[in-house]
Amino acid sequence: MEIAAHGDDTPILLPAAGGFTRPPADWVSSAPVLSVSHAPIQGRLGGHLVAKGLLAPETLRVALMEQTVTRQRLGQILVANDMVSRRALIDALIELDPTSLATEYVNRCPIPPDLLREHAIIVIAETEEAVYVSTGGPEDVARFVVEDHYPGMEIEFADYIAANQDAFVEQIARNSALLNQRREEDMLDGLLFDAITSAASDIHIEPKRLSYSVLFRRLGRREVVYEGNPGEYDKLVTLIKTRAALDIAERQRPQSGSFNMPFQGKFIDFRVECLPIKSANSREKVVIRVLDTERINPVLGKLGITRLDQWRRAYDQPNGIVIVSGPTGSGKSTTLHATERELDRLDLAVYSVEDPVEYQLPFISQVQVNIDKGMDFKNAIRSFLRMDPDVIILGEVRDEETARMAVRAAETGHMVFITLHATDVRGVFSRMEDLGVSKTNLKGLCRGVMVQSLVRTLCTKCEGAGCHHCHGSGYAGRTVVSECVAFSDDREIERAIEGEVWWPRQIDDAIGKAVSGVTDVAEVRRYFGAQVDIWEERHGPVPPRGGAMPALLAAGGAAEDAS
């Protein structure tokens, strides 16, 4: 075995170059003892991340094992396997050596080349939260320029190397020119680029009799971004279907496909759906889902879950069922995905069945539903139970057999995550009963429930007034509003089934976020409607921003009986 230390005197065992250790003849009955000695630290990055608590020693050991095979940089392996975030990696590199990133720069950026040259700005790297830059001029001027083109992003500065300035600007100018040329020759690339850089989650291409519209969905709402003629539409749809490996001649039946494209050192995935529309001269409507895993790779602590401690207490158990519920588009899958990322995926055997698999996570066995091949939720669970699982994660439970199998998996010692469509905790239990799961079963197995929705958050630049950063809407993000309860015993589950509520509800959480300035009352009313009026009848007018919530709700206590 090869030994690698990582800074805290704990040795890391790596396989020898020749492969696995040859076992002794009596290896079945013997208990082998490994004798190890310390060796010099192999690179400072891994040890630094371990020392900061960002990486577990065992995780570093696994990454170093992969490095012996792939010969990639350690940082590449850590980010690709979701072991650390790209932001954490960049910060660690800067802490270790402030000059380590100075020679790097991005291939594309939204800042015009002339501005970059005029103010001596180099964009070094981007993450989902921050942009790293260097400048040969005043930092406050560079910050103003960068913030204008990277709204809502944190700006971090690194060492500036003047010799790189011309090469960086020339590369940005060259790529911008190529992009403009492609937009003329192949509008699809320009469309995809605009969708990625504007953080659109979906692209809708709507055919009409004399024209067509392109709409981007941002923050849950659609907006028209382009109008074109039918001839252009035909060329665009043909390009999309070709990239997604669809039949370009088939216009009478729905089709599904996917493709990806490189973007700033990573790959963005696109999922394509085509649907014939009778009222549009039999043309197809096309929807493209944008799957930028780095931009929207969810971190559980940043989703806005107010009672996050309750959620973590619910799922951090060896067995049982935890349930995430809410309407379509409420962020249930994102919450599950973020929860998966918090699991110890090296220690736990985690299996997931999804329809479809949108974001791939290393060390989770993800299965995509394929009805034509006999791979549905029920068959996936059956297979999982024969694969030594610790955790089973299901998409939406839609039928009785899947619900019963989920219960059976929990009864046999596994932790099971499921999603449902219900708007409150009591409704979750009613839905499970509709699916054939008795209250008796749930009383012994349910560890916790979270019901959630999404509301838009105020733009931090204009505080809701509307500016170019938020496209004049006043909003620049979304947050979870939720009600969450972890059950301590069967009696608490029984009380919840009967309709008793001793936790803040979704409407309480939403109004609390409006009072604290995360969102505003107008957005809460848009989503919850008359529930706001009912809340005011019970608790009085909604407090002004920065005001005090009713004492009971501010303390996280019970709202009232839901019955």
Image: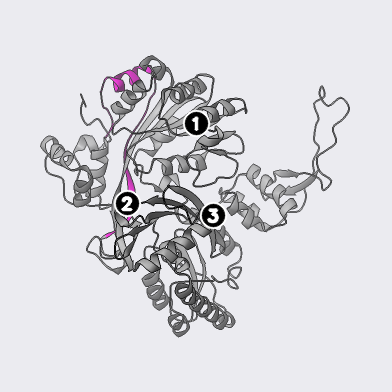
The residue to which callout 1 is attached is 377
Q: Quadrant of the C terminus?
A: top left
Q: Residue furthest top?
A: 440
The image quadrant that residue 214 belongs to is: bottom left
At x 62%, y 54%, the residue is 48
Q: Quadrant of residue 498?
A: top left
**Residue at mark 2:** 278
In depth, the one of 15 and 55 nearer the eye is: 15
Residue 148, compared with residue 302, is above or below; it is below
Judge depth for marks 1 and 2 and give the one in front: 2
Residue at image point 33% right, 63% down:
212
344 or 235: nearer the eye? 235
Secondary structure under badge 2? helix
* Residue 91 in view: no
Q: Tell which tag, 3 or 1, sits nearer the viewer.
A: 3
Q: Which residue is mark 3?
A: 245
Is 476 in the magenta?
yes
Across and down, in percent, residue 394 comes to: 47, 33
| Earlier residue among tags 3 and 2 | 3
Residue drawn at (65%, 42%), measured in percent from left and top?
A: 58
Give the residue type at disc 3.
Ala
